[in-house]
Amino acid sequence: MVFKRRDKLTPQQWLAQALWPKRGWGRAARYMKHRLHRLPDTPHKIARGVFAGVFTVFTPFFGLHFIIAALLAKLMRGNVIAALLATFVGNPLTYVPIGVLSLKMGHFLLGTRFDPHHERSFIGKFFDAADDFWRNFLALFTDRDTNWDALIRFLHEIFFPYLVGGIIPGLLAGLAAYYITLPMITAYQARRRGKLKAKLEELRRKKQAKKASHKP
């Protein structure tokens, strides 16, 4: 295959690159900025797309962020590609603080409390919910009884508070991204139009000069 790696990564190397890319997150951010600049759309639509992508990162729908960001961008009449690019704000370095903030905010708004030292930890409840799915799937083909207790605890203690708590910080982060992106894209597109206009003027002058030189 054309894009297949010649040297396969070990699990440790794959994890290391997921947490910190070979050329750093700074290069990844510059690449995203470059792609946003080059999008063929109005600054307002691109900025709305960025808002949709950043807001989506604060939702607990892991694995579905691309789909949700695209749908939200469509509803907001924003640029879908900008929304997809903006979801990369969520990465292994940011998901932990985003998750902690959203979860604490959610329990505060709901008047509930999550104690990670009681019974099972935050990560433990994720595994318990996944285990419920697997065991109940196997129960479809056996005489085993289904049990959704772990999934229900996960929904009440993790998912729903995360969903509620991510709204306010998601809106604030999305608005900040919108108001940062809008003038940046506007200035870039104006500068690009100016350069294109200057090039066209230069070509026109050269064409006129060439015609003048061929006159007897």
Image (cartoon, rainbow, N blue to C red):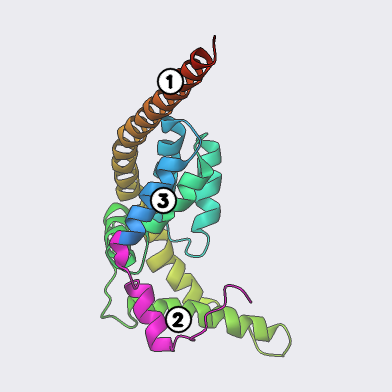
Residue drawn 66% across the image and 89% down it: 144
Q: Is residue 10 magenta?
A: yes
Residue hosting label 2: 127
Residue drawn 31% across the image and 36% down it: 184
From the viewer's perspective, is the residue at label 3 or at label 1 nearer?
1
Q: Is residue 56 visible?
A: no
Residue 1: x and y in percent read: 64, 77
Real-space CA distance between mark 1 and mark 2, rounded to the nearest whole angstrom = 64 Å
The quarter holding residue 162 reads bottom left
Amino acid tagged 1 = Glu
Residue drawn 43% across the image and 20% down it: 201
Secondary structure, mark 3, is: helix
Residue hosting label 1: 201
> Looking at the image, do the residues carrying marks 3 and 1 touch, with CB atoms under 8 Å apart?
no
Residue hosting label 3: 86
From the viewer's perspective, is the residue at label 1 or at label 2 nearer?
1
